[in-house]
Structure formats: C-alpha cells, structure tokens
Image: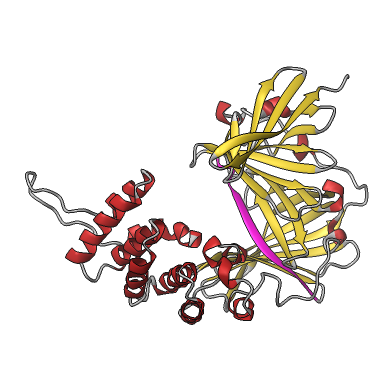
Amino acid sequence: MRLLLVLLGLLFSLAPAASAREADEVAPPTMADVQAALKRNDPAGAARIARAIAKAQPQNASAWFMLGYCLHAQGKLEEAVVVHEKAATFPKVAPVALFNLACAQARLGAKDQAFDALTRARAAGFLPNPQTRRDPDLVSLCDDPRFDKLIPPAGANLPRGNPKQFDFWLGAWDAKVRLLGAKGQWNPGGTLRIRIERAVGGHGVVEYTEGSIGGSTPTHGFSLRAFDPRENVWTLLLLWPSPGKPVFSMLQGGFRHGRGEFLAGRGASLTRFTFSDTGAGRFRWDQATSKDKRAWTTTMMFLGTRRADGKDIAVRTLTPSVCPGDEFRSFDFLCGKWDAFEGRSIMGGAAVVTESEDEYAIRAYDPGRKAWVCYVLRYGSPRFVRYQGTPDSLANATERLRWVERGKDRLVRVRERRVKGEWKTTKRDVFARRAR
C-alpha cells in the first residue's frame, strides 16, 4: 500500500475547501487536519478526522480514501476493506482505492478477492511500477501465475537485455540541443558536452554533462544507469539540478530493436526518454510527455556526435556555482583521494560522489526535505539503495550509515542494520587519505 502515499498531496488539493465562518464558530475538521495527524504518526487520530469529514460530506472522495488508508495502516483490515470499496465508487480515486483493497484482501488471506480487486484496479486505470511488485502487502500473491499477468515485471515485454546495451554511449560526445517551439517548429536550444564511463566493475554506466539548454545559464547533468537481470529492466537515476535545487529523478525501461525507451511518472504526468539512431559515432535522444501513455509529444532532442579528441569535460571538478550555500557542503569532507575510494564535488557543487571498485555513491542536499539524499550502487547488486538523513546518520528502513570520524586525513564509517527495532553495527571502515 506504499504507492498511495505519493497521492496524498493530490488528494488534499482535491478536497473541498472550508467556507468562511464567524470568528467564534468552531471550525469543522478538514483534510489538512488528516494530513497533520499522519505527519504526527497518528493514524488513529487521522482516521477519526477522516471519518467525521466523510460523515459530514458523504461525497468527499478524499475523506473516504484516507479513512480507508488510515484503517489499513492500523491493521484494521476488515473495516478497511469496506471503506476501500466505498472509496472505489468515486472515479478520481478508484484506481488506487481498488489497489489498496487488493492489498487488504491479500493480507487477510483472501487471494481470489485480492486478484479480483487487482483486476478491477487495472481496468480502472491503475498503472503498476516496479515498486508495486515489491509491496509487502502483496507477498502472498507473488507465487500465483495471476500476479505476473496483472502486475508484470518492468521488462516483461522487452527482449532479454544485458548490461552492455549502453556501451554504444561510452566515451566523449558533443550534442546539439533542439527545442520544440510554440508553433511546432524545432529551434536551436544550445550545445552540450557529455562524458560516459563505466562504474562499479561495469555494473553501472555514469553520465556527466555540461553546457547550456535554452539560454545562457550553464546546464549540468548526471546520471547513473544499472541493469537488473532479474527484472530485465534498466534503471536510470538522474540529477539535473537547477540553481539551489538538486532533486533526483528515476526512469525505467529497456531496449528493443536498437531503440531504448525509458519511462517515469504516472497518471496524467508521464515522461519518456528515447535513444535511437545509435550508429557509429552518433546518437539521438528525445524527451516526450504524455497524459495517457498513448499520445506523446516530443519536446526536446539531443543530436550527439562523438568527440574526435576524446577530451574529458570539466563537470567533475567545477567550483560550487550551482549550489553555493553552506547547506550543500556538508559532505565535502569526502572529496579527495582516499586509500579505498575517490570523492569529488560535481555539477557546480550540487552533489558529492564517491567511487571505489565495489561501490558508487552520489549524495545531494534536498532543500524541500531539508535532508541529504544518497543513492548507492554496489558491485554484485543491480539495484540502487536509497538513504536519507544527515552526514551523521543516513538511513533507510533496514540500514544506516554513520561517519563517526571526519578528520583531515582519516575517516571512520560505521554500517548498521536494524535488528528487532535496534541498530546493530555490522561493519566499521577506516579510510586514510592517500599521500600526495
């Protein structure tokens, strides 16, 4: 049921606004109150508020949807099933409400009812993604043949891929940018220099880009790509920061007949990246958008030619210009050459990467979250591991990384695993700066 969390903002924006009241009148509860209770980790309180709103406003789809979510989160699955069904009667929330219904039925052991709800969810427009397959509520359904038909692997409809499909892109490139004009014409949109190299023993492909797109403001870009043979899918982790806003994005897809296609988003906001014309010394990259995954509008393209000199680009060693604030400098202590890895600030100070033989990691400060976000790709594992927090504690649900010593010439990192609710140290790494 984790998928629905991304819809909370949308649902609250759809909720009816409260009317004006006299100053001494007690304001009735609102969907903002539900959100506030959830932020306090109080699903029971949020359920009471959502129930009151649903009772007062029986046609409030957001109230019914969130009541079902809050009951589900408390483990009150029998009651949640009834409310999920009610929420599914409202078209704007029906796809995800039916998916949540399937999750509840699966946890109750009602497999046939769960698959019926999944079937209805797909018919209503629910679009699964690779994370959907790993939803813990659906574990009991994974071994059933019906599961792959309703929630197919991300690369199920692609020819069998391999980790060398981006090898055509290795090296140094120049690219001309073309932008779609207001009247449908293609206009010159700038130039880029691109460097592509392998990482993590060939498990990953790294892109560094600099130049300009649509104006004189410098453009900086980064991506790290990895192929998952189990899911038969490529995952593209991107960081193309605007000044002061280094925010990650992710796409997934694969290659068919020499053409690469990678998608992101859901609902009425979809993005597609396409690689084509990948002949000797050239490539074409397109960006397109869609509201329904059927009609696509291409808005930008790169036309790349291989650099004859193979010269690297300066994007790896730029001074802090894109993100110059002190809040973006917290991981600069990693920069330099250490005995087990090399660290550097990239893209005008927007991110810090570290690279070793068995691990590639990128970290960027997200002002919206007021937290650092870190993605790690490790040798032997085709999936990115995400952490969030501070340099003192970057964590996810199961693992935590802490830099407990940050000296000029010595670093100490502790890796911990969550065991029965407590953090237990599993590894302690000591790094010394290489002699100059």
The percent coordinates of residue 189 (x first, y second) are 67, 56
Can you tell which quarter of the image residue 364 is in? top right
- Position in image of residue 99 (x %, y %): 47, 71
**Above/below status of 99 relative to 53:** below
- Tell me if residue 250 can be seen: yes
Q: Is residue 400 above or below residue 66?
A: above
Observer-nearest of 233 and 293: 233
**Residue lying at the far right of the rendered structure:** 309
The percent coordinates of residue 386 (x first, y second) are 63, 47
Above or below residue 353? Residue 50 is below
Q: Residue placed farthest to the top in the image? A: 408
What is the magenta range? 245-256
Residue displayed at 50% across by 37% down:
370
Q: Residue at x 36, y 66 (%)?
A: 80
Q: Residue at 35% of width from left, 64% of height from top? A: 68
Residue 404: name its quadrant: top right
Give the main secondary structure of the magenta stretch.
Answer: strand
Left or right of 245, for residue 52: left
Magenta stretch holds residue 249: yes
Q: Residue at x 74, y 48 (%)?
A: 377
User: Per the image, is 99 magenta?
Assistant: no
* In the foreground, 112 or 436: 112
* Foreground of the two, 74 or 67: 74
Residue 184 placement (x, y as % from top left): 59, 71
